[in-house]
Amino acid sequence: MPWDFGGVPPDLRTWLATPRGPMRVLIPGCGSAHELRYFAELGHAVTAIDFSDVALQVALKVAGPFSDAVVKADFFKFQPAAFDLVYERAFLCALPRSMWRAWGRRVTALVRSGGVLAGFFYFDDNRRGPPFGIAPELLERLLERFERVEDRLAAQSLAVFQGKERWQVWKRRL
Ligand SMILES: C[S@@+](CC[C@H](N)C(=O)[O-])C[C@H]1O[C@@H](n2cnc3c(N)ncnc32)[C@H](O)[C@@H]1O
């Protein structure tokens, strides 16, 4: 899996090093869900969803004692809302561009007012994917109910994202 980081990316570790109190966290399209256990061990109430049985089999193993937090679900039909944090990594760029507006609507519905969308975004104008790169202006339009409060080149990227992956934090407006 060329997108699988195989662990917790350093930018997420850095961000979580600042105490933020217990958060209700959603990891959509979690794949192997390496971050799930890290969130859970820090005391956050985390749910990781994916609709692929192959991904879920790996995620359940990686989650160990937190396997109850791994749920088979389609992001576009998933009901629970009002998360403090939706964590993005290699999910938006895995979706066909025709689904991006729906992704924006779902993220807006799933993050509570004042909550955040944080994670990694792949910026490129490549025609073929996945991963499908996004233009910064389009991401801003999809997230018009959010304000971007952090933005920097990812500290460590896999070859497939190298030089084009940014760590960003978007705060949902009240
Ligand atoms: C490129 S992988 C990234 C996995 C993981 N986030 C990571 O960083 O390694 C994208 C994942 O999104 C899942 N996925 C795609 N569309 C989905 C949907 N509508 N609902 C839930 N999962 C979805 C796929 O099954 C796949 O595991």
Image (cartoon, grey):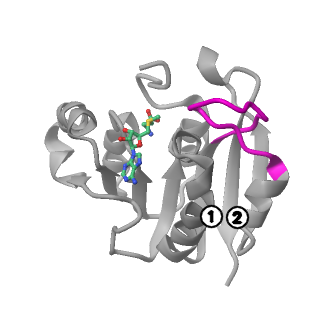
Say whether residue 146 is left or right of residue 34. Answer: right
Say whether residue 33 is left or right of residue 19. Answer: left
Q: Residue at x 70, y 48 (%)?
A: 168
Say whether residue 154 is left or right of residue 41. Answer: right
The nearer-to-camera label among 1 and 2 is: 1
Name the residue tied to disc 1. 101
The quarter of the picture showing ligand 1: top left
Q: Residue at x 41, y 64 (%)?
A: 76
Pick the front one: 140 or 117: 140
Q: Earlier in the sequence, mark 1 or mark 2?
A: 1
Q: Is the residue 102 above or below the residue 132 in the image?
A: below
Tell me if residue 161 is in the magenta stretch. Answer: no
Tell me if residue 124 is in the magenta stretch. Answer: yes
| Residue 31, percent from left and from top | 35, 37
Q: Label 1: few (<14), some or many (≥20) within 10 Å?
A: some
Q: Is the residue 97 above or below the residue 104 in the image?
A: above
Marks 1,2: beta carbons within 8 A: yes
| Residue 137 image-quadrant placement | bottom right
| Residue 50, percent from left and from top | 31, 48
**Which amino acid, mark 2?**
Leu
Magenta: main secondary structure: loop
Name the residue tied to disc 2. 142
Q: Which residues are magenta?
A: 121-136
Q: Residue at x 39, y 60 (%)?
A: 75
